[in-house]
Image (cartoon, rainbow, N blue to C red):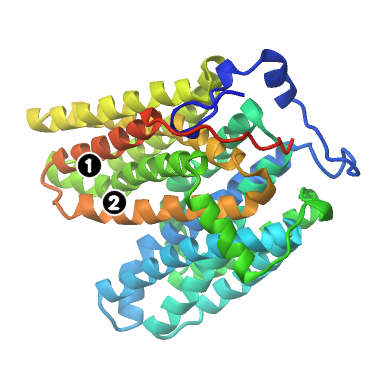
Amino acid sequence: MPVTSAGIVDQSEVDQSEVDQSEVDQPDAGQSDADRGRITITTMVLLGAMTGLGPFSMSVHLPGLPRMADDLATSQSSVQLTMTACVVGIAVGQVVAGPLSDAYGRRRPLLVAMALYCATSAVCAAAWTVPMLAGLRFAQGMFAAFGMTIARAVIRDVADGQRLVRLFARMALVSGLTPIIAPNLGSALLVVTDWRGIFVVLAALGALFAALSVGSLRETLPPARRTRLRPASTARTYAALATDGAFLAPSLVVGLAYGAMFSYVSSSSFVLSDAYGVSQTVFGVLFAANAVGFMAGGQLGAALAGRRGTIRALRITLPAAATAAAGITLAALAGSGPAVVGTLFLTVASIGACMPIASAEAMRTRPDSSGTASGLLGLTQFALGGLIGPIVGAFGSTSALPLGIGMCLCLLAAFALCLRPAAPRPTPSPAA
């Protein structure tokens, strides 16, 4: 099997019989088809929802931050630290969740984490100080991260090749709804309750996910494929992943693309309102439209990867995204608000097209430790997103120029990773 630049296997160069075989669920010896290889619609929706649980938990309470500051008798900036704590918890939790799921299977750690997420969210509703709430939000983010990490690992357990890309794109259909639903739901809840009631709703959501996991999520990692949980062994696995170009290159592509996306999410409301006079109502419509574009882009990217191969698909979608981001810059220089809005839509949709492809490529390199790989992939994604977003936002909101330049640079760097030569490495045996 040929290995191309950046250590990414070009599926278009693989023998067609091998590609066809990757479309079929192949259960491991000793496992029945009922245990592995089938993903129902219910399970797919559940996995997609869990992938979005961390960002949802992070953003659903945003409309209630001013009331929270008043209730806790503190400043707005102090309350915003609770959101930062949740982001850090999501990043750390993924690193913890990966090795645990490789050692104990997917279901058990997930069920425990969802139960703890439910309990932590309920206690958040009773917090009376900012430090207490920040600590609880860190724990809440950690437990939400288990759902994100294990969802990716489950998909890797049951799929490979183009089917893996396709399933990642389908998960994005559900998780892509998060930016639409979370702020709007938070605003709607504040009509009938306060910020504490929002955390009660999150607790109920955790209980619902736990119940659905019991009923519809099968164990996809058989005991024969599990690894012993040892700190030294886990550290070696993470070190091996971090130095493996076949994993690291697509992981960085995901992180840089998410950095561009996070820049948009964190800055666009200020930029569009301050620089171009867009009202909050109109911005909500535009934000929803872009989220739909992101989801549609994921499906188009998966179809493109099926026809042209993964590396070629990335070499099409990433330049398209960078070009659209350059269009934001030109539109900002021209002072055209409508052009900024149009090029933002194209950029977000193109990012949606490339992220599932790159995520699948990162996950497929290490089928023997897919939980740990998923954790490091998630850490890379959130670390780069959390770093790049504030940097872009620091340049102000009087123009879309910083946003366009920042997104363009991220996407060009991601594209460069797909062009960088990498030494061939043995192809791991497929897990599906």
Q: Nearer the viewer, residue 341 or 294?
A: 294
> Quick check: can you spot residue 205?
no
**Residue 208 locus on image (x, y percent):** 68, 59
Q: Are marks 2 and 1 in contact (CB under 8 Å)?
A: yes
- Which badge, 2 or 1, is on the more N-terminal residue? 2
138 relative position to 341: left or right? right
Q: Is residue 95 above or below residue 310?
A: below
Which residue is under mark 1? 406
At x 32% / y 25%, what residue is drawn?
A: 319
**Residue 281 locus on image (x, y percent):** 30, 43
> Quick check: can you spot residue 131?
yes
**Residue 202 locus on image (x, y percent):** 56, 64
At x 47% / y 82%, what residue is drawn?
A: 127
Helix, strand, or loop for circle 1? helix
Question: In which quarter of the view is residue 20 placed?
Answer: top right
How many numbered dots are placed on residues in this image? 2
Q: Is residue 412 above or below residue 307?
A: below
310 relative position to 105: left or right? left
Q: Nearer the viewer, residue 297 or 9?
A: 9
Q: Residues within 10 Å of mark 2 (few under 14, many from 20)?
A: many
199 relative position to 216: left or right? left
**Residue 397 locus on image (x, y percent):** 15, 48
Q: Which residue appears farthest toward the left when viewing the image?
A: 334
Q: In whole angstroms, how far apart are the C-alphas of marks 2 and 1?
A: 8 Å
Q: Amino acid at mark 1?
A: Gly
Helix, strand, or loop for circle 2? helix
Q: Is residue 119 above or below residue 414?
A: below
Which residue is under mark 2? 388
Q: Amino acid at mark 2?
A: Ile
3 relative position to 329: left or right? right
